[in-house]
Structure formats: C-alpha cells, structure tokens
Image (tube, helix red, strand yellow):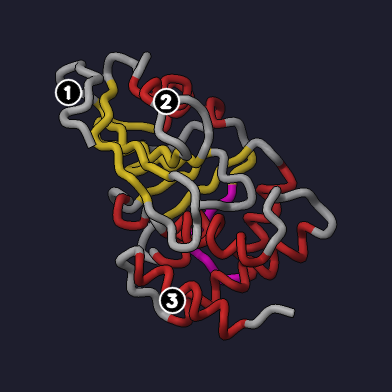
Amino acid sequence: MTDRNAEIRTLAQGASALGLQVEVSAIESALRLLDELERWSRAYNLTAIDARSEMLTHHLLDSWSITKFLHGTRIIDVGTGAGFPGLPLAILAPDKEFTLLDSNGKKVRFVAHAARTLGLRNVVAIHARVEEHVPAAPFDTVLTRAFAPSPELLRKVAGLCGADTRVLAMKGRRAETAREGLPADWRIDSDQPLSIPGLAEERHLLVLRRASDGSAALDSAP
C-alpha cells in the first residue's frame, strides 16, 4: 500500500535538490497522475516502469529536472508517450501552454484523460506523427526524451520550430556522436548534466537552437 506522506516527502526533498520550490498541492497532483497511470497500466501497456518508487524518480523528478530550461510559453512534448515529461511540467508551470504529441493512440488517450482528471487546462493532447503535425505558429520550446539521435530529431521537428525555438533533448549516457551530423542551420547551445535525486543513472540535456551563422559547433565544452 502506498505511503502517501512518504511519497510527498520524497518528492518535496527531490524537488528541493533540483532547486525547485514546489507547492504541496502540485506534489499531490503529480501523485494523482501516478495513481491514474498505475490504474490504466493494469489494462494497457503504457510504461515499462511499474515500481512506484521508480515512477517517482524516472517519471516525476526526471521530468522536473528540466524545468528551468523551458523557453517561452508555448511548449510541445514530442513523443510524449504516457505524458512524460510534459504532464509533470504542466503541473509545475500552469502559466505555460503544453501540447503533448504521440503517434500511439492509447497513450494519447491516457494523456487526455489525465489532463482532464487533474484539471490541467494548459494541456492539449494530439494523436499524430511529428512530421504530420502543422502548428498554427512555431513553438517556443520543443521537448523530447530519448526520442532519436540529434540529426534525425532536428529533421523531424523542423516544422514545429521558428528562429527562436529551443529544442531540449533529454538524453541518457553522453555520447560524442551526439554532435555529429547536425543540420547546418542548427547548433548545440549547451550540454547540461542532470543529477536526478534517487536516480543512479547518467542523464544530460542537449539544448539546441538555430545557428544564425550556419555553424553547428558547440560554443564551449560543458
């Protein structure tokens, strides 16, 4: 049986370690999200992670680790799966608009259900392939988590991006090949190490943006 108070403490301490001040109401919403995920996962295969303790770290704290890198107000989470990192970020940032896109219909249905259940009016769930989605205007931030190698990723999301868009690519173990083969009009703005409380796995974040000079080189080593 879930110890709710212990989970609240774990998330509060984890958020603090990430430099975030998270209201208890937001933590409770995040835990309700996990409740719904567990309930739906009894019937549908929504996530490979089924241990509640790992959901706290791999789904919630991992998602929250990139909060400070969000740029602008219009955010799209590409390949969101069951809603990560988009749903946990939408809980923390009610002033931003989140579009959560995936090609898997049952996962998109869960995202829409979770947004309704949690009262997240800043979330729109879209069932589509990323190459087929045509937004009314470019997004400020494009989020991905373990989606595709950087060159392929940037080609797929090109139609979502404008001159000032930031692409935040959440990655696992750092690989030097991540810098190879980038389109000529993109550059790696920064390569940020991510330390997730309670998660003993390597994480880092590539921040990519349009290169005004056509250079795809990283300005400085991380």
- How packed mark 3 is, by other alpha carbons closer than 10 Å (few <14, some 14-19, many 20 or more), is some
Left or right? Give the position of 121 relative to 39: left
Rendering coords of residue 102 (x, y %): 61, 40
Dot 3 or dot 1: first in sequence order is 3
For marks 2 and 3, give the CA distance: 33 Å
- Above or below residue 4? Residue 104 is above
> What range is drawn magenta here?
118-125
Rendering coords of residue 60 (x, y %): 52, 61
| Secondary element at tag 3 | helix
Of residues 67 and 10, the one nearer the viewer is 10
> Which residue is denoted by mark 2 in the rendering?
150
The answer to whether one can see residue 13 in this image is yes
Identify which residue is drawn at 80% across, 52% down.
Answer: 44
- Amino acid type at image mark 1: Ser
> Which residue is denoted by mark 1 in the rendering?
212
- Amino acid type at image mark 2: Ser
